[in-house]
Amino acid sequence: MPYGRRRRRYGAAPAQPKRVKIQLPPKPNLKDLKQRYEGYVVANQDLRIKALFDATEWFKEAADYLIAKSQIDLDLGKELQGKISDLTKAIKCVEQAVDVSLGNHNRETALKLACQRYETYCSALSPIAKKDKQGNDMLNTAGAVEMTLSIAIKDYIQKYEDQKIELEARDAQSAAKYAELLISLKDTFTNAPFKFKVTEEVQARKLIGSEFCYPKPMAQDMVKTLRKEGILKLVAQELPHIGKAMAVVEEDGRLRIDPKKQIEAMDQLFKDFVLYCQRADAPGRIIRKGDFGGFQQAPPVNPQPQQQNAPQPNVASPRPPRQPRHQGQPRRGNRVAGKYKAGSTIGTIFQRMLDMQEHTKAELFAGFKGCESGHSAPFTRILRHGHTIEVKGNTVKLVQINPNI
């Protein structure tokens, strides 16, 4: 028995219920929103619309975070309840901007309004007083200062307006600099339903709205390929990417590539290239020979075993020495007097003189362009071969033929 007095135990106190900790979604980073807003300052309107859509995606995550946090922060819940109309209007504006039939201008306006409404609703993330045009604090219906987000879309809209002329000038300069490449792509792929463009606003080839955009470094390499290796290499390089862009379809609000449409598009693009090569203004040589790199030759599927005594590939076998032609051995083809090729200028003139009669130079040179009555090169050649001719002013006569020819 243990030493000491044993304490009397009464009933144990009931355990306190554990406090359930609400799991909050990750807090959105304001730097991500700033980066998406900076994508708005470009000349391409499709890129501006894409940047605004990306910003609304950030605001959706921010709204979910604030709604979850309002369950444990009653003051935040009351604040969000008073701004519920801003959230509703922002969602309606985004739904309107999804409709492509409205036109890019109306879609861009709707998205800018949606971002402004979202900024008011999500102002608790980084609050700042909303200012009017005169720079004074704006008040809400309760008389309190109305707050908004510290990062505002209106600042980037003003930045775009300030740089609009410069951005458009850069696009025009790129179109003039890469006109050879853009015209070649347009003439080659006539059935492509978009316009080709070179811009510094993308990092890789990308279909943006109705424009297929190339970055400047890639366009420079494509120009080198076109000039150095020929248009066939350029077509083989770009055909899969353009065919994939033509096969993009929308399904359940998401974009995907239809393999069947991709095959049909590539087939049509190849036919366009064939028609382009048959045009009168097409380049005479579509490919240039040489090892320029880029494509690797595939190994044979079933390589045939080589015989031991067979010559190794890429090794030129020595040619047998050429035997000298014996004197008096007949030459190939029809010859006039065994020396001159039939149908040639000198052969025709000599054949006309074989009747040993006098002929005028005009008769001998008849039918030959560039030969005039004072031309004496053919007769000098005939004399060099040992024949005897007699020239009297404008008349020529063959006196004797060299029998050793």
Image: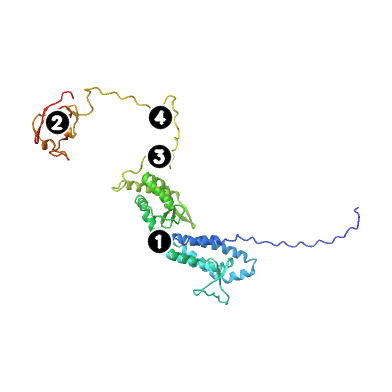
Residue at numbered disc 1 = 168
Residue at numbered disc 2 = 351
The dot on residue 315 is 4
Q: Which amino acid, by three-letter code, is at mark 2?
A: Gln
Q: Can residue 87 be seen in this view?
A: no
Taking depth in this image into account, of 260 and 359 the one nearest to the observer is: 359
Q: Between marks 3 and 4, how big is the CA–CA gap?
A: 18 Å
Taking depth in this image into account, of 26 and 133 the one nearest to the observer is: 133
Q: Which type of secondary structure does the marked residue at label 1 adopt?
A: helix
Whether residue 69 sits left or right of residue 352 in the image: it is right
Compared to residue 78, the image places residue 254 above or below, namely: above
Task: Mark 3 or mark 2: name the one nearer the start of the chain.
Answer: 3
Q: Can residue 119 be seen in this view?
A: yes
Q: Which amino acid, by three-letter code, is at mark 4?
A: Val
Residue in the picture at 34% in, 46% down: 274
Residue in the picture at 53% in, 61% down: 33
Task: Mark 3 or mark 4: name the one nearer the start of the chain.
Answer: 3
Residue 51 picture location, percent across and down: 48, 60
Residue at numbered disc 3 = 291
